[in-house]
């Protein structure tokens, strides 16, 4: 699933990334001595005459840095094991690195500057546009030939959009996010709500019935735009506000009608106690990327989330919710369905010793010519794959059949209203600003207009 740092974390990270990147760009990039030594050792150790008198092929060793832990890391280990088993000429070693934005990005940029980066890096944070603009990534275009000539047509369009910068493909998702509205069936029944909301007005009215405060403390809530850190950016597709630019190519959310509608809607929830919502969230132990949240614990009527909510979080944190929830397309101001196109993108850092083999591994992880295996892995992670053909795999189809609530997530991936945020050099600053703006509007510190102005200022900085 997509993991996010809070506004404070992201704001602090921006300056650190900028300083490290400046140093990285000022140095001559080269393949590090260690990488050369490893490659040389591999050739020396494996090249020679076999028992049949033929020269054996050297093994290419790939390094893959990821930021996952727990159950998801176990799935990655299964994927690496399968790849190594089926690709005898390539061996992948996965390394888990710290998952906070500052540390992970700093570690990657330091490795690039030293000329010894990993061959593949899984990027959670909105840094791909910045990496691409500063020459820190390998463009994948040269590898889209032969058996990979149709690769971008195999992907969902939003997957290609989310990995493209200035017409060049720099990133490929191993899984995509698809966001929808979860609802608690028991709470709907308790408050006399006969069916889940189909419009934004119905959602606002239904959720308003569910707020419960006792002795000055929030005990239960209906819906809140910023639960789990899902601020402004995560609702943009529902208001046609994902990519708001002026004719000069600058961010212009202040004058974007969709962004205005969205921020005004967020502001309508400022009547609820922000501090108490955050306190309740802390009390249930919710953390970025965690498997426990207010809705999973049965303390909220609605939440915006992805397939992992029902596939991983509920069974792990509150099995009692199984069979007691449903999913609807989020009812924004554009026709349903739509979703924000995001995912877990794999990139090839500049200086990778084996970029062609790295791309082969990345395409395999996405499910290209590997639909059956990835179709068996994605349900375990609660993932939407990078391309629709994976969803036709028997294991994936069995997962969909066993969990009817999943049916709404896939149509969103091909909806004309679904968009991925355009990659720009300042996307991380933009996302941090959107989170800060959301928090300040919900706390009545800023007006919606001031919040949009701030987003533009930071995004165009």
Image: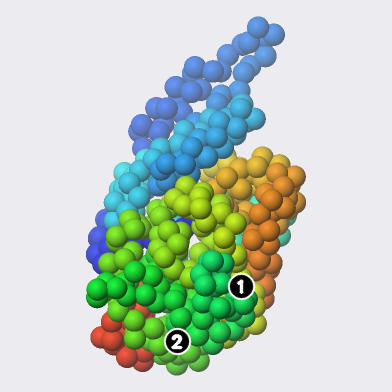
The answer to whether residue 238 is seen in the rendering is no
Residue, x 38% and y 70% (percent of image)?
A: 220
Residue, x 62% and y 76% (percent of image)?
A: 195
Looking at the image, residue 368 sits to the left or right of residue 109; the answer is: right
Residue, x 24% and y 73% (percent of image)?
A: 215
Examine the rendered structure and indicate whether residue 455 appears above or below residue 422.
Answer: below
The answer to whether residue 398 is seen in the rendering is yes
Pick the front one: 172 or 77: 77
| Mark pair 1, 2: CA separation | 17 Å
Identify residue for label 2.
265
Label 2 environment density (alpha carbons within 10 Å; few <14, some 14–19, many ≥20): some
Examine the rendered structure and indicate whether residue 381 appears above or below residue 243.
Answer: above
Point out residue 172 in the picture as x, y percentages from the top left corner. Answer: 56, 55
Q: Are marks 1 and 2 in contact (CB under 8 Å)?
A: no
The quarter of the picture where residue 449 lies is bottom left
| Disc on the earlier residue, 1 or 2 | 2
The quarter of the picture where residue 238 lies is bottom right
Label for residue 9? none
| In the image, farthest residue toward the top | 51
Identify residue for label 1.
329
Point out residue 346 in the picture as x, y percentages from the top left corner. Answer: 51, 51
Callout 2: helix, strand or loop? helix
Examine the rendered structure and indicate whether residue 281 appears above or below residue 338.
Answer: above
């Amino acid at each position: 699933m997509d993991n996010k740092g809070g506004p404070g974390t992201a704001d602090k990270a921006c300056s650190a990334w900028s300083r490290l990147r400046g140093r990285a760009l000022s140095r001559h990039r080269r393949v590090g001595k260690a990488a050369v030594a490893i490659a040389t050792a591999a050739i020396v150790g494996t090249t020679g005459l076999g028992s049949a008198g033929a020269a054996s092929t050297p093994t290419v060793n790939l390094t893959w840095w990821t930021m996952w832990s727990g159950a998801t890391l176990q799935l990655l280990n299964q994927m690496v094991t399968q790849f190594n088993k089926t690709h005898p000429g390539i061996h992948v070693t996965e390394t888990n690195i710290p998952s906070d934005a500052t540390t992970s990005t700093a570690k990657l940029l330091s490795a690039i500057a030293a000329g010894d980066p990993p061959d593949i890096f899984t990027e959670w944070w909105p840094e791909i546009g910045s990496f691409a603009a500063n020459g820190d990534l390998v463009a994948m275009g040269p590898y889209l030939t032969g058996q990979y000539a149709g690769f971008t047509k195999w992907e969902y369009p939003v997957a290609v959009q989310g990995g493209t910068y200035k017409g060049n493909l720099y990133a490929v998702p191993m899984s995509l996010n698809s966001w929808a509205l979860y609802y608690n069936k028991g709470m709907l029944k308790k408050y006399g709500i006969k069916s889940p909301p189909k419009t934004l007005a119905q959602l606002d009215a239904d959720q308003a019935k569910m707020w419960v405060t006792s002795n000055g403390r929030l005990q239960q809530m209906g819906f809140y735009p910023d639960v789990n850190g899902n601020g402004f950016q995560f609702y943009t597709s529902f208001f046609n506000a994902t990519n708001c630019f002026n004719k000069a190519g600058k961010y212009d959310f202040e004058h974007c009608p969709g962004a205005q509608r969205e921020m005004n809607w967020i502001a309508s929830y400022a009547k609820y106690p922000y501090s108490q919502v955050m306190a309740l969230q802390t009390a249930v132990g919710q953390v970025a990327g965690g498997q426990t949240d207010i809705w999973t614990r049965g303390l909220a009527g609605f939440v915006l989330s992805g397939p992992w909510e029902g596939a991983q979080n509920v069974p792990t944190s509150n099995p009692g919710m199984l069979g007691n929830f449903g999913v609807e397309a989020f009812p924004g101001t554009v026709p349903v369905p739509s979703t924000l196109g995001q995912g877990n993108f794999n990139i090839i850092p500049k200086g990778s010793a084996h970029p062609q083999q790295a791309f082969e591994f990345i395409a395999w992880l996405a499910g290209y010519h590997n639909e059956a295996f990835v179709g068996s892995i994605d349900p375990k992670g609660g993932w939407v794959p990078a391309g629709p053909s994976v969803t036709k795999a028997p294991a994936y189809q069995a997962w969909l059949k066993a969990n009817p609530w999943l049916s709404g997530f896939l149509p969103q991936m091909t909806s004309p209203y679904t968009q991925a945020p355009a990659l720009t050099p300042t996307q991380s600053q933009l996302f941090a600003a959107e989170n800060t703006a959301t928090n300040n509007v919900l706390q009545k510190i800023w007006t919606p207009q001031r919040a949009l102005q701030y987003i533009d200022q930071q995004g165009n900085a």
